[in-house]
Amino acid sequence: MANHQSAKKRIRRNHTRQVINHARKSRVRTFIKKVEAAITSGDQAVAREALRAAQPEMQRGVTNGVFHRNTISRKISRLNAQIKAMA
């Protein structure tokens, strides 16, 4: 247990950040799942629209420091390749 005021404040702050980051991560994962579901359904137009909606959300996760930029770049690239392969 924290004894100093600054340590107690740090615990509160860390918990708040953890909750916010978890929500952001969950939101990005949901968008990715929508794209993957559209890919498995076989409809290229819907999949392309889902990816177009997901990309800004994914990049926002990078900007907020929740994901590493290379991770999101790799995911976008792979999803895009899967959509192109549907043609």
Image: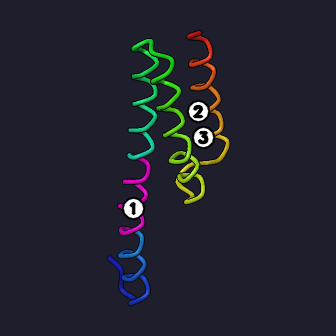
Look at 65% across and 29% down and name the residue there: 77
In the picture, the disc for residue 50 is none
Q: Which residues are magenta?
A: 15-25
In this view, the residue in front, 49 or 1, is: 49
Alpha carbon distance from label 2 to label 1: 22 Å
Looking at the rendered structure, which numbered label has been put on residue 75? 2
Q: Are marks 2 and 3 in contact (CB under 8 Å)?
A: yes
Q: Label 3, on which residue?
A: 72
Quarter of the N terminus within the rendering: bottom left
Q: Tell me the amino acid under the disc marked 2.
A: Lys
Q: Earlier in the sequence, mark 2 or mark 1?
A: 1
What residue appears at the point 51 percent right and 17 percent down from the top-left corner?
44
Mark earlier in primary sequence (3, 1): 1
Q: Is residue 19 magenta?
A: yes
Q: CA distance from mark 3 to mark 1?
A: 19 Å
**Label 1: which residue?**
20
Image height of 36 relative to 24, above or below = above
**Marks 2/3: CA distance?**
5 Å
Residue 22 position (above or below residue 3): above
